[in-house]
Amino acid sequence: MTEPFHGISHMLAIPFMDHALLAGGLIALASGVVGYFLVLRNQVFTGDALSHVAFTGALGALALGVDLHLGLYLGCITIAVVMAVLSRRGITDDVTIGNIFSFVLGLGTFFLAYYATHQIGGTDATAGVSVLFGSILGLSSSQTTFDVFVALAVIIAIVIIGRPLLFASIDSAVAEARGMPVRALGVVFLVLVGVTAGEATQAVGALLLLGLLATPAGAAQRLTTHPYTAMSFSAVIALASVWIGLCLSYAQPVLPPSFSILAIATSIYLGSWAISAWRSRVRGSGKTARSTYTSLR
């Protein structure tokens, strides 16, 4: 009976697992609350575009011989601001996102080719793979501290602007008519999405970034229609996905952390879909029974 607890204590005694659980947990919470608004505002495609921006920004930094994290954050934040400026009421349209998406992806290909063919400060052949698939188990103590503070800043910012952002997300026209700075809220939100994308890339990689942002939020919205409850559910689901995924990867080293994390998140989403379908069926049966009873009367 003590074997599982012995395994957990052994896992927590390993520094890189402590870093991954701490940083990954805070990144998950930030991704959950930001992802909720991303889904609510129908801006999931924006998150997809930023996943490619993360890849391009990191490779651009490596090609210039600087820390890839600088390019990761700077690229995501810059493109997020550009998309917000080009948008109407802070909500980007698909045409704008598509153009930025394709250009950034092409730029990333250029940076990858340049970095691979030039010896820039000692070329690291695994850097591109780490950006694509995440490197949460490779976080240093200083990087973990930085990620924790950034994630906390994102969460606090969402809490501060959450109420007006919710109003602007549900009915931007009415919010604007009442004098609410809808466009400014949209810009601030996309900046927060950019920062979160930069962080989440380290946890699950650029290719799977969208899963950590959208999947927990999608599951939460199927479980409840109450905004604040759904936001809390989204954060908890993201946190559970990261922590359980990391534990699975520790127990079975053949499983990459990014795969385990997204597998858990997807399983929870499928479970929420099943619960939602069951609720609809029960409500439909109840309505049918009531209408039958009424007709018999």
Image (cartoon, rainbow, N blue to C red):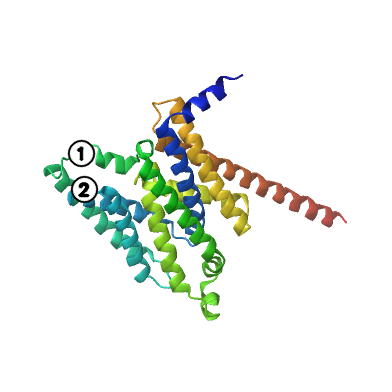
- Count of numbered badges drawn on the protein: 2
How far from the left and from the top, in percent, is residue 229? 62, 54
- The mark that comes first in sequence, 2 or 1, is 2
User: 173 or 166: nearer the eye?
Assistant: 166
112 relative to 230 in the view: left or right? left
Image mark for residue 62: 2
Quarter of the image with the N terminus in it:
top right
Q: Which residue is mark 1?
A: 124
- Mark 1: give few (<14), some (14-19) or many (20+) Cα within 10 Å: few
Image mark for residue 35: none
| Relative vertical location of residue 86 with respect to residue 5 in this rendering, above or below | below
128 relative to 282 in the view: left or right? left
Please tell me which residue is depicted at 74% across the width and 53% down the height of the picture: 287
Verify CB contact (< 8 Å) between mark 2 and mark 1.
Answer: yes
289 relative to 27 in the view: left or right? right
How far from the left and from the top, in percent, is residue 39? 49, 57
